[in-house]
Image (cartoon, helix red, strand yellow):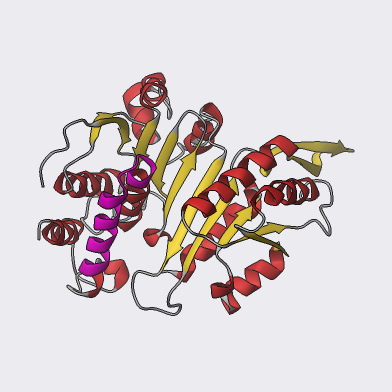
Amino acid sequence: MHQLDKKIPATLIPGDGIGPEVVEATVRVLDALGQPFEWDVQQAGVAGVEAEGDPLPAKTLASIRERRLALKGPLATPIGGGFRSSNVRLREEFELFANVRPASTLIPGRFEDIDLVLFRENLGGFYVSHEYYIPIGDDPKAAAVSTGVNTKEGSKRIARYAFEYAVKNGRKKITVVHKANILKALTGIFLDAVREVAKEYEGRVELDDMIVDACAMQLVMNPWRFDVLLCTNLFGDILSDQIAGLVGGLGMAPGANIGKDAAIFEAVHGTAPDIAGKGLANPISLLLAAGMMLDHVGLQDSATKLRAAIYATLNEDNIRTGDLKGTATTREFTDAIIRRLEK
């Protein structure tokens, strides 16, 4: 395919472990699509510490701030040294309030025809916990306290983003997941805010709600009853991995973190240091994240071609990596997708 005339500036973060391998695979596939992005390669995670002494170096932040668009491999949090998670720092730095996690069936398995999207509020709740210990007697850690904060404004913001997504993408129903029967204030404010926003979309998008434990069970019993899930931070963290499990695990699951001024797309799996450098990594998670990135910048045709090539490689060519019971190396699998794109 021909190169696109005007490339879109974006930050590229190879990451740690298998990150550089799946990032290289993804860049090669995007090259075959005409490479719409002009990459500024920056480091983060352990690679950031090795390069700049910081898991989230200032020059990496500056690059994202300037380009407002990034694709990143998995990042490891260095052990010791008091380093915080780079992923959490990125969310806070760029106010990436919406975590978007789709799950779609790509290969035959236990669950067929899964097509879900989960929206997770990314900045509040129990996940951004404010924790402390209470000393009693001679035990300085006799009791532990954790508080979570949800705001009405933050809850409405993620709700409106989810409803707008549903309207644009032909989604018909949003299920808001909560625990308002017990956490009446913390998740009750979220539920009330979502219901308030839902009134603006009456007749276009249906809203229902479900307590989180019932939702977890129904996702296993009858996942087809769901279309879009809208969750607080902690519940979204848990359920997004559960829906990934319906379609083959985290290696098949992409993610996006969306804010007002920046968007970061990522593989949601870990760094898998045990297989790093061996050519065994499955690049599908990051490839699908790149597809979401293409959608985000208005290149839906390229995103559709990318997803079709992945599906055909898996199901028509039967070329798969070891985690999918195949024998292909990362490069062999990537080469097969590129052949599909060049047909």
- The answer to whether residue 281 is visible is no
Question: Magenta residues, as a range?
Answer: 294-313
Label the magenta part by its dominant secondary structure: helix
Judge from the rendering whether residue 79 lies leftward or rightward of residue 4; answer left or right.
Answer: right
Q: Is residue 301 magenta?
A: yes
Locate the C terminus by quadrant: bottom left
Locate residue 36, reporting x and y percent. 23, 38
Nearer to the camera, 232 or 36: 36
Q: In the image, residue 150 lies at what x, y percent?
A: 73, 40
- Residue 317 picture location, percent across and down: 17, 73
Image: 212 above or below 18:
below
Quadrant of residue 248 in the image? bottom left
**Image point 20% across, 56% down: which residue?**
279
Front-most of 337 and 7? 7
Residue at the image point whose x is 31% and y is 31% from the top: 10
Vertical placement of 333 versus 298: above or below?
A: below
- Is 262 on the left-hand or right-hand side of 121? left
Q: Observer-nearest residue: 163 or 325?
A: 163
Left or right, residue 214 beside residue 89: right
